[in-house]
Amino acid sequence: MSDLDTLKQTLLADVAAAGDEAAIEAVRVAALGKKGSVSELLKTLGTMTPEERQTRGAAINALKNELTEAIAARKAELRDAAIAARLVAETVDVSLPVRSSPAERGRIHPISQIVDEITAIFADMGFSIAEGPDIETDYYNFTALNFPEGHPAREMHDTFFFPPDANGERKVLRTHTSPVQVRTMEAQKPPIRIIIPGKTYRQDSDATHSPMFHQVEGLVVDKTANVANMRWVLEEFCKAFFEVDSVTMRFRPSFFPFTEPSFEVDIQCDRSSGPIVKFGEGTDWMEILGCGMVHPNVLRAGGLDPDEYQGFAWGMGLDRIAMLKYGMPDLRDFFNADVRWMNHYGFRPLDVPTLFGGLSA
Ligand code: DAH
């Protein structure tokens, strides 16, 4: 066998053995590259006699051509194999069930939903949000709100008291969100338009009472705030919140130490069809909030001159309102952290309540 035949067999064997595109490229460089074995042979053509060139020269060229073809064919083969392997590896099984994202699976608690709804409504009317501590001083929870020392109204609140501290001061778990009224007046000058959502605490527990519950307070203080403004604000709120075109409200005279005059507000409704109450229709009345004109002593406690400023305020329990709006029969379930209850009564996290997009849609 001639040297060319031997070289050809070796090179063709290398081509056949190349397992991937990098390997076949290496074979090509080793044979046909600048210093490749076949290239070196081609360089000898110039030194040959014309006869030699006709026989050996033709054989070298034939070797070069055959090898070039073999390499191209193997390259194509390897490229096809690589694509086929990728297609197999990257197959998507479209019949598999889709795993939903946490943003879809999670649920917003009805209380958070209600707070978001109320915030959306009052933000639209130019209110901002104020907050205060759950552990409150006796002063802000009672005294600054015009509850006289030893007055029975303090007992009416079924207060959780902390043991007295080193100074003999007895902190409380706030019994309402009203203490944030005075905290806000101390911190900012009128005009004040705030709502105060938050947790509140009283010693009470049954199907409609929980020792921890939620309120939203509202406070408006400026030089001209009056009962008519208050009625308008509360009526607009109720229409938006209960998602009806009109509501009939009833303002009954009442008493709170921190407002004068004080009212309890009932809203007309239809309670004849089970746990979900219909608002804006019917012949029943349901009490939904307390309100009034801020008492001069409360303005004074907030550092404001009652001859210059006046205001109105209201407070509303959220838990019962949530039960009525969304038809949950037992308040205690709100705080049992039962995931089945949450899946049923909770709201989708991406359905953020807005006035234009719908509150509870
Ligand atoms: N703080 C009262 C309560 O918990 C509710 C309330 C009534 C708040 C009248 C007010 C108000 O701001 O003006 O029962």
Image (cartoon, helix red, strand yellow):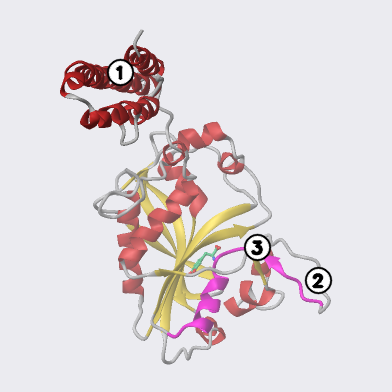
Compared with 320, 249 (above or below) is below
Look at the image and give the residue range highlighted in magenta: 168-189
Label whose residue precedes the other's in the sequence (3 or 2): 3
Left or right of residue 213, residue 33 in this image: left
In whole angstroms, how far apart are the C-alphas of marks 1 and 2?
90 Å
Q: Secondary structure at mark 1?
A: helix
Q: Place residue 7 in its image quadrant.
A: top left
Q: CB of residue at label 2: within 8 Å of ligand 1? A: no
Position in image of residue 349 (x %, y %): 42, 45
Viewer-side residue, 88 vs 18: 18
Q: Residue at x 39, y 18 (%)?
A: 14
Q: Residue tagged by mark 1?
A: 74
Amino acid found under the numbered disc labelled 3: Met
Q: Is mark 1 within 8 Å of ligand 1?
A: no
Q: Which quarter of the rendering shows the N terminus?
A: top left
Q: Nearer the viewer, mark 1 or mark 2?
A: 1
Amino acid type for the residue under numbered disc 2 = Pro
Q: Is residue 175 magenta?
A: yes
Is residue 94 visible in the rendered image? The answer is no
Q: Is residue 207 above or below residue 138?
A: above
Whether label 3 lies within 8 Å of ligand 1 gets the answer no
Q: Earlier in the sequence, mark 1 or mark 2?
A: 1
Query: 188 or 176, which lies in front?
Result: 188
Q: Nearer the viewer, residue 179 or 355?
A: 355
Q: What residue would you read off at disc 2?
A: 164
> To which residue does mark 3 refer?
156
Which mark's residue is nearer the viewer, 3 or 2?
2
- Residue at the location (48% across, 51% down)? 112
